Image: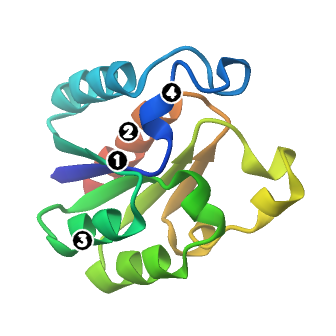
């Protein structure tokens, strides 16, 4: 199984942006652990991060993956276009958030992806990416 890990805006700042909320792990560290875990599960993994909504959508449109892990960041709460792209490519995906948006500011309770994801893993920090891989591997078995 080929898994695309799609990371949205500002996730490139992990480790330095609000570490009291998001922790000190960088996105590179998270990706490194995710890659190692995927190898152990026999999964191929590719990573893509962008601060631009259209770039994320264009990456999805390549359709060169079987399933995805999506941390859309703030686009979770604003992007009908990203939702439409995820529906359009018709690939299962797990939504991941390092924190639990529902426990934060009220505007973060709007979620355009939750109801179309096969699962949502929120508030588990970087471990959520590994849990998403486990879930996708179990679905394939």
Q: Position of residue 14 (x, y in %)?
A: 50, 27
Which mark is nearer the camera, 3 or 1? 3
Q: Element under label 1?
A: helix
| Image marks 3 and 4: residues in contact by CB distance under 8 Å | no
* Residue 141 in view here: no
Query: 75 left or right of 129?
Result: right
The CA distance from mark 2 to mark 4 is 23 Å
Instruction: Report the front residue among 107 and 99.
Output: 107
Q: Earlier in the sequence, mark 3 or mark 1?
A: 3
Residue under the image location 39 percent in, 25 percent down: 30
The CA distance from mark 2 to mark 3 is 26 Å
Q: Position of residue 33 (x, y in %)?
A: 32, 20
- Residue that carries the numbered disc 1 in the rendered image: 138
Q: Position of residue 107 (x, y in %)?
A: 81, 62
- Residue that carries the numbered disc 2 in the rendered image: 134
Residue 29: which numbered mark, if any?
none
| Image marks 1 and 2: residues in contact by CB distance under 8 Å | yes
Which mark is nearer the camera, 2 or 4? 4
Q: Element under label 3?
A: helix
Q: Residues within 10 Å of mark 3 (few under 14, many from 20)?
A: few
Instruction: Report the front residue among 132 and 70.
Output: 70
Residue under the image location 34 percent in, 47 percent down: 138
- Residue that carries the numbered disc 4 in the rendered image: 14
126 vs 104: above or below? above
- Give the color scheme: rainbow, by chain, secondary structure or one colour: rainbow
Q: Earlier in the sequence, mark 4 or mark 1?
A: 4
- Residue that carries the numbered disc 3 in the rendered image: 58
81 vs 4: above or below? below
């Amino acid at each position: 199984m080929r898994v695309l890990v799609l990371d949205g805006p500002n996730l490139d700042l992990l480790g330095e942006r609000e570490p009291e909320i998001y922790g000190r792990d960088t996105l590179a560290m998270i990706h490194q652990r995710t890659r190692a875990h995927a190898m152990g599960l026999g999964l191929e993994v590719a990573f893509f991060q962008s601060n631009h909504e259209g770039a994320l959508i264009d990456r999805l449109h390549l359709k060169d993956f079987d399933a995805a892990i999506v941390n859309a960041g703030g686009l979770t709460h604003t992007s009908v276009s990203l939702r439409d792209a995820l529906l359009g490519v018709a690939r299962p995906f797990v939504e991941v958030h390092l924190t639990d948006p529902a426990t934060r500011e009220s505007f973060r309770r709007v979620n355009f992806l939750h109801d179309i994801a096969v699962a949502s893993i929120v508030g588990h920090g970087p471990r959520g990416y590994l849990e998403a891989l486990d879930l996708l591997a179990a679905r394939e078995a």
